[in-house]
Image (spheres, grey):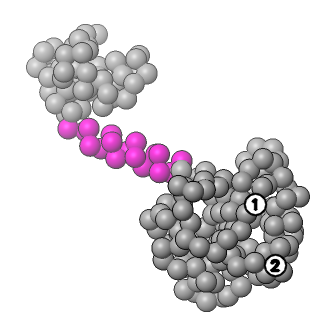
Amino acid sequence: MKGTPSFRGRNALVLHRVDEGIERLMRQLERLGLTATTRWEVLDLSRARPDVVFVDADQGWNGLLPWAAGEAPMPLIALLGSEAPGRIAWAMDHGAGAIISKPITASAVYPALVMAEHMHAQHLATARRMADLEERMRLRPLVHSAVQAIMTARAIDESAAYTLLRSCAMRRRLTIEHVAAEILTGLQPMPEAG
């Protein structure tokens, strides 16, 4: 994390019944520059697309948040007064990146925002890396076929053919899988030995 995170101009949604602790949370969010609204109903992302969501993990139920387990589309902070393992698990399963204990104190809000935003960014980066790796794994048979084609066309062994393919990919700053697909479809000429 670089610099001091600012939340000015962002929108927060608090899914919780209004009480003294929530009023304290709303005041602190306002001090931090967020526009916050509160309600206690199923989150409808077609109606509101908040930048961060605070949710009552003590009373939350499956279906309150409209995403699959762990796939929160924005930072999520659980508000939790219970130490019940099931309530903690519910918050984690729904993608909470931070927890604020009840009764809510103003000093807990900013660190929770920073932590939730960081955890959400980490989750997105990991998901992108996983998708990239899955795509590369799916395309691995193309690499094998391209190596075989290079071996046949250039009368070289497998190691030399792979080295040619890898060098071509590095020169073009593309993945080996991408270059292999181009070679096999004729979009890229067969690399020269040498």
- Mark 1 Cα shell of 10 Å, populated few (<14), some (14-19), many (≥20): many
| Residue, disc 1 | 36
Name the residue located 71 percent from the left edge and 85 percent from the top edge.
81
* Left-right relation of 1 to 133: right
* Left-right relation of 64 to 135: right
By secondary structure, the bulk of the magenta-drawn segment is best described as helix
Vertical placement of residue 41 versus 3, above or below: below
Quadrant assignment, res 96? bottom right
Is residue 129 found inside the magenta-colored segment of the image? yes
Q: Position of residue 125 (x, y in %)?
A: 54, 47
Q: CA distance from mark 2 to mark 1?
A: 14 Å
Q: Is residue 108 visible in the rendered structure shown here?
A: no
Name the residue located 30 percent from the left edge and 44 percent from the top edge.
137
Name the residue located 89 percent from the left edge and 58 percent from the top edge.
31
**Which residue is most to the front?**
47
Determine which of the numbered discs, if any, sits on residue 193 in the image.
Answer: none
Q: Amino acid at mark 1?
A: Ala
Q: Amino acid at mark 2?
A: Gly
- Mark 2 Cα shell of 10 Å, populated few (<14), some (14-19), many (≥20): some
The disc, 2 or 1, on the residue closer to the chain's N-terminal end is: 2
- The residue lying toward the viewer, choosing from 13 and 180, is 13
Of the two numbered discs 2 and 1 in the rendering, the one whose residue sits closer to the viewer: 1
Q: Secondary structure beneath disc 2?
A: helix
- The residue lying toward the viewer, choosing from 194 and 190, is 190
Q: Which residues are magenta?
A: 125-141
Q: Position of residue 43 (x, y in %)?
A: 56, 66
Q: Secondary structure beneath disc 1?
A: strand
Vertical placement of residue 13 versus 130, above or below: below
Vertical placement of residue 1 versus 66, above or below: above
| Residue, disc 2 | 21
